[in-house]
Amino acid sequence: MTDRFEKGLNVRKDVLGAEHVARSMANVSEFNKEIQELVTSWCWGDIWTREGISRRDRSLINLAILTAMNRNHEFKVHVKGALTNGCTPEEIKEVLLQTAVYCGVPAALESFRNASEVLAEWEQETDGSSGRA
């Protein structure tokens, strides 16, 4: 494995959780191996490790982009990542309200539904306390 891959794998685990990443990597096959390596090296190793903006800000940007693209599975994964990166439910709500104007109300409504599910799970995992699990 390359240094980029290893850096990316570490950031991916920090943001999305080691358990989530382990599940993703356990599902790697000969067919999808290259895309997992690309995502880990490029997205997480090259982009998420840059110093230009914080992980917290990257998370908020991802939520807006994933709402615009209607990528619900990835959106849910990144809501949890946003919480891990220190984003508050209030900040997530504000981003989703912003997406209603620029991406459309149906997309924002779907993201609100998905975020509500993740926030409820987060509250249970953290025993109702705010912040990291």
Image (cartoon, grey):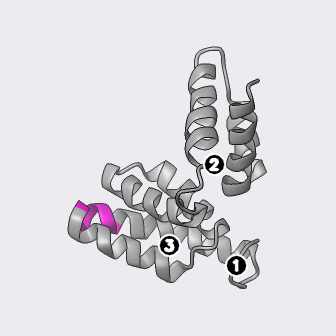
Mark 2: amino acid: Thr
What kind of element bears circle 1?
loop
Depth-wise, is mark 1 or mark 3 nearer the camera?
1
Residue drawn 38% across the image and 61% down it:
64
Q: Which residue is mark 1?
A: 131
Across and down, in percent, residue 132 comes to: 73, 73
Which residue is found at the position 50% from the left and 49% from the top?
74
Is label 1 or label 2 in front? 2
Residue stretch rendered in magenta on the structure = 103-109
Q: Is residue 77 magenta?
A: no
Marks 1 and 2, how far apart in space? Answer: 22 Å
Asked if residue 96 lies left or right of residue 104, the reply is right
Inspect the image, locate mark 1, and give the three-letter code of the amino acid beneath it.
Gly
> Are the residues at dot 1 and dot 2 in contact (C-beta closer than 8 Å)?
no
| Mark carried by residue 49 | 2
| Residue at the image point whose x is 56% and y is 26% from the top | 35
Say whether disc 1 or disc 2 marks the residue closer to the N-terminus. 2
- Looking at the picture, which amino acid does disc 3 mark? Ser
Q: Is residue 67 above or below residue 41?
A: below
Q: What residue is at 68 percent from the left and 30 percent from the top? A: 27
Tell me if 90 is positioned left or right of 96 in this view. right
Disc 3: which residue: 116
Q: Is residue 104 visible?
A: no
Tell me, yes or no, whether the two marked residues, 2 and 3, touch with CB atoms within 8 Å: no
**Crowd rating for badge 1 (residues with CA inside 10 Å; few <14, some 14–19, many 20+):** some
Q: Is residue 61 above or below residue 95?
A: above
Instruction: Work out whether residue 85 can be spotted.
Output: yes
Give the mark, 2 or 3, whose residue is nearer the N terminus.
Answer: 2
- Quick one: 59 or 103, which is closer to the camera? 59
Q: Is residue 110 above or below residue 31?
A: below
How many dots with numbers?
3
